[in-house]
Image (cartoon, coloured by chain):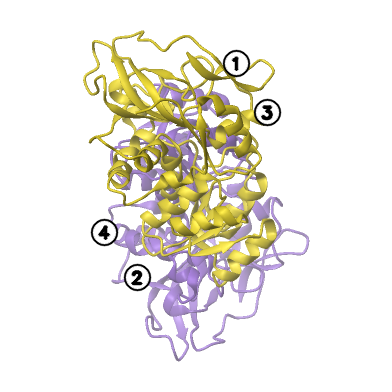
Chain colours: A yellow, B purple
Amino acid sequence: MRAAVYTESGAIELGQRPDAALQLPTDAVVRVVLSCVCGSDLTYYRGKRPHAVGSIGHEAIGVVEDTGAEVTSVRPGDLVVVPLQFHCGECAHCLGGTPFACVRGATFGNGTNDGGQGEAMRVPFADRSLHAVPGTGHDDALLKSLLTLSDVLCTGHHAAVCAGVRPGHTVAVVGDGAVGLLGVLSAKRLGAERIIALSSSPVRQALATEFGATDLVAERGDEATERVLEMTGGVGVDATLECVGTAQAVDTAFRIARPGSMVGLVGISDDLDPPVREAFWRNVGWRGGPCQVPVYLPELLPDVLDGTIDPGRVFTWESDLGGVVAGYRAMAEQKQVKSLLRVSPL
Amino acid sequence: MRAAVYTESGAIELGQRPDAALQLPTDAVVRVVLSCVCGSDLTYYRGKRPHAVGSIGHEAIGVVEDTGAEVTSVRPGDLVVVPLQFHCGECAHCLGGTPFACVRGATFGNGTNDGGQGEAMRVPFADRSLHAVPGTGHDDALLKSLLTLSDVLCTGHHAAVCAGVRPGHTVAVVGDGAVGLLGVLSAKRLGAERIIALSSSPVRQALATEFGATDLVAERGDEATERVLEMTGGVGVDATLECVGTAQAVDTAFRIARPGSMVGLVGISDDLDPPVREAFWRNVGWRGGPCQVPVYLPELLPDVLDGTIDPGRVFTWESDLGGVVAGYRAMAEQKQVKSLLRVSPL
């Protein structure tokens, strides 16, 4: 089958992989309908983090094509969200609410297993890992929003939850990538009263405003810190979402957090270096890391289905699977917020 | 008046300071009955952190001797807990639940204001800062427990709260100083089912067990990590209290925390360097810093008064104020858990 592959030279190409097929009675095979490129994929594309040669991509919705004998929760023809990772649902970490640490789980598109940026995926532990979408006849806008449940919306929500966003809060979101923008949406959904989006791009500022940002800060670094502190009477914000991962963004996030507050840290970096000492004395804490999609999805799915939230608006570029490399490039050059791949018709 | 002073040569001595006196109508003057030495005082004693020349010490209970014209909540003769810091109760940080960041507040014994290790203290914002102890005729054991409310018990509780201890949890407490031991007590009080105390000293192990530890780990560093992981089926603990502050202790705390859990980090260090990257990928977060005594004291005071908890058992050494330097030495040499100073009779 056709699929994006990470090559030995470190490039991403549209290539061929073995057809997705059942291997265990708990597997399902899903034909991918929509996929997309994640900010974390870009870290591999840019050569900033190593990636195994082979499959890549971990965001997809699709239609179940085949199920193993033990699969009972989905059947062929079902529309499903494939979360960024599969998990067993039975180990201590799954039962403890942290399926990302599942001892039998793995992120899709890890080089070996099937990635989201391909024609189909074998999904292990299908009863646990797949989320069936109720109803039929969903329009294109809704399908795009459903796709965001596989990672990016849940990650924005994760940042807001980790930051401890509560009704009435003044919140700052550092980063205007798709995660940051959906962090804005998530903060709004959780009742934030004032949402300061740190964004310098007019297109992203507009999206942030649509998603609920009440204030925009175009500055970066020390100037951004000063600006946010000035806007909050020198106090800092009640909750901070860090959705970039660069040293500068992480530093800003900790410095604009008010004493006693939390930074929801989801921006991916392999050399995180938060200002720990200052944070300690200011009682600023941190929670974050990769998102637990299966934990959040049941709460978010109804709001997507009934149109309360419309996270699919983060897709500003699209193509068929053949355009996957162009999709990476468009995001890497920061010309587009997030690249959608129309892999097969519904 | 007589008081411990931090000298120009970096030593701590018993010296003379101006008598504590009212300066503002919102002040009170408290005659110190009991005081003690804090682990953070030891960082100055050991020369590991700078301290202004002058007053030192921030833990005390005493009797109100005089009050300014605007003070209404306490009156001369009242027994009071003096928390580690005074705070105005009206700024954004006080109102936001983080009085440690009070814009008008300061820690007692900062060189300039009166310290707890002295005969008396001027307490600014007395209506907010002092906590009157109800009842009379409290026995000596209870007075010692009341003294722990000024910092060390609240800090142990803070570590447990920041670590997210909940009923049924398996908890680890790194550190067997007074804060760690009262972290054990606090975890028990919050319903932890299993409490693993990392302690190698027989005296401290015994106290930890009295306070609720169910398991003892005498190892340190990688061996301690391996041991705790082994004890928890490779999973790690549900909540971790870091009550030391050394690089090794912080590292251990993050590594024994189960994925998705929190480290309550209260051990004081000026070169904190947690394994941030590993913590990120394991969804291990961190909250901590200095304790918000006024936030916690109202919850803890009733349990001290009715004997539900007996935190005063952490005092393993005592003298009058004249023995203050010996009290520092006893703790610095790790011969004693915590040094009590009997400054004046009740």
Q: From mark 2 to mark 1, how far is it between C-alphas?
A: 68 Å
Q: Residue type at mark 4?
A: Asp
Q: Quadrant of the C terminus of chain A?
A: top left
Disc 1: CA contacts within 10 A as few (<14), some (14-19) or many (>=20): some
Q: Is residue B235 above or below residue B287?
A: above
Choose mark 3 or mark 4, whichever is in front: 3
The subunit letter for the residue under badge 4 reads B
Residue at 34%, 32% in the rendered image: A96
Disc 3 versus disc 1: distance between alpha carbons? 13 Å
Residue at position x 58%, y 50% from top? B268
Residue B123 image offset from top left, x and y in percent = 51, 77
| Looking at the image, residue A204 lies above or below residue B220 | below
Q: Which residue is mark 3?
A: A47
Question: Please, what secondary structure does the residue beneath circle 3 have?
Answer: loop
Give the residue type that dot 1 points to: Val
Quick one: A211 or A138, which is closer to the camera?
A138
